[in-house]
Image (cartoon, rainbow, N blue to C red):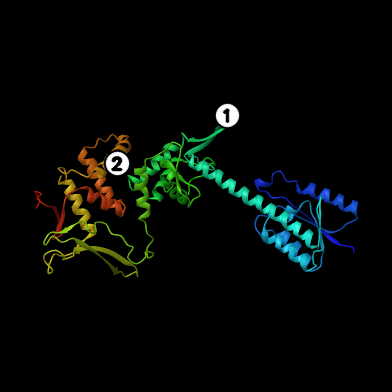
Amino acid sequence: MNLKYCLYARKSTESDERQAMSIGSQIKEMTTLAEREGLSIAEVKQESFSAKQSGYRPVFNEMLHGLRNGQFDAILTWAPDRLARNAGDLGSLVDLMDMNKLQHIRTFGQTFSNTPNEKFLLMILGSQAKLENDNRSINVKRGIRAKCEMGWRPGAAPIGYINRSYAGVKEVVLDEERAPIIKEMFERSGLLGQSGRTIKDWLDSSGFKTKAGAQLSLSQIYRILMNPFYYGYFKYPQDGPLYKGLHQPIITKELYDNVRSRIDDIVPDNKAAWGSKKFPFKHLFYCGSCGSKLTVEEHFKPLKDGTKRRHVYYRCTKSTKDPDCKEPSIKASDITEQILSMVDAGEFDDIEPTEQLFRKIEQYKRVTSQLIKDHGIVATERQHFKNYASYILKQGSLSEKDGFIRGLNTPMFVSARQIYRRNSKSQ
């Protein structure tokens, strides 16, 4: 019986098949074998595709279709693993044999006819190829995990670092040109309260470019600001565990947390889940009349152009001594202005802030001192505190505003649109 052979040649572009014979060599060897044995080649098919997963090879699927419709009834290929390295594709071939659609498979060193023993041998060889794949995958993952546990993140170093190799040793070192800029990006976000757009405008105006010569996009800036690599840790894969790196950090963990809290507090309009909205100062102030804590209310006023103006008010919870407390509500903006007025008046000069707030003020002072030094300005301690309070209360994230009020470490009371400290001279 004259069989119609389809010559199928495949070589994957993946690293695990670097040593496999090239497609051209496979076709040449099998064409020579066909001429020597008098085999009729109806069509030659070739593709560069991995055979690890079932159903993903378009040319292989075309060959299966040709076998089903009688275009050919035999296969000529270099080795069994060129046809299948997974159970699904191997099962498709055996099923075609069972249906007498596939009569014969000829490889360079073996033949497989539609007999129980030879089909069984084909399945063993295909399963062996799958086992090699699975073991290779396990070994690769184990090697990557070991590398991560040693402190080295696989892949290219993020911007601000460079990969270096010498004497067979690979390491990640600081990019002396870009690392200081990356550090200032974090400081501008975490200490000066600048948005991603403001940071991008600054980077573009200063001519900052990646190693590829491109400007950073806004999404790239946010990815940098959320990457723990810059304080000495990394995740691999992206949703994997956190590893401690051996590379030199560019920033501190405290600055990273500060930046991350600001980004996490950004919630798109009209997309917050019920109960997920956050408000500054909630439960941090007390009613000046009855001493109860304040709660928050949100109101929207319709405007003529169809939009709405948002107003946030704080009012007494009436939860302590006087359920009929008549203390009026106060706007969030009024609270901010009153606190800033108290800062200007020196109301907080005698406070002992919490250690966390003290560190943040000192960190802010170090950064801003360097930034304003170029303008010949020398700020006093009170001015530094005032600048920090102003930026936090006007531009800071919700958690930063809460942290600032808590850090003042003194009871704050709201009464008749005024704010005062207990036992303060302004009471």
Which label is found at residue 167?
A: 1
Between the residue at mark 1 and the residue at mark 2, the CA separation in whole angstroms equals 43 Å
Q: Earlier in the sequence, mark 1 or mark 2?
A: 1
Question: What residue did someone put label 2 on?
Answer: 364
Q: Residue at x 55, y 45 (%)?
A: 142
Depth check, front residue: 54 or 272: 54
Amino acid type at circle 1 is Ala
Q: In the image, is 401 to the left or to the right of 233?
A: left
Q: Position of residue 283 (x, y in %)?
A: 22, 58
Q: Position of residue 28 (x, y in %)?
A: 83, 48
Q: Quadrant of the N terminus?
A: bottom right
Toward the front, the furthest residue is 117
Q: How crowded is mark 1: few (under 14 residues within 10 Å), some or many (20 or more)?
A: few
Q: Nearer the viewer, mark 1 or mark 2?
A: 1
Q: In the image, is 243 to the left or to the right of 134?
A: left
Q: In the image, is 97 to the left or to the right of 139?
A: right
At numbered mark 2, what does the secondary structure look like: helix, strand or loop?
helix
Q: In this view, does 208 lie above or below 51?
A: above
Q: Is residue 235 above or below residue 174?
A: below
Q: Residue at x 73, y 46 (%)?
A: 20
- Name the image quarter holding residue 256: top left
Toward the top, the furthest residue is 167
Amino acid type at circle 2 is Tyr
- Report the label total: 2
Can residue 263 be seen here? The reply is: yes
Q: In this view, does 408 lie above or below 96?
A: above
Can residue 158 be seen here? The reply is: no
At numbered mark 1, what does the secondary structure look like: helix, strand or loop?
loop
Q: Where is residue 157 in the image (x, y as percent from the top left)?
A: 51, 41
Which label is found at residue 26?
A: none
Q: Where is residue 301 in the image (x, y as percent from the top left)?
A: 28, 69
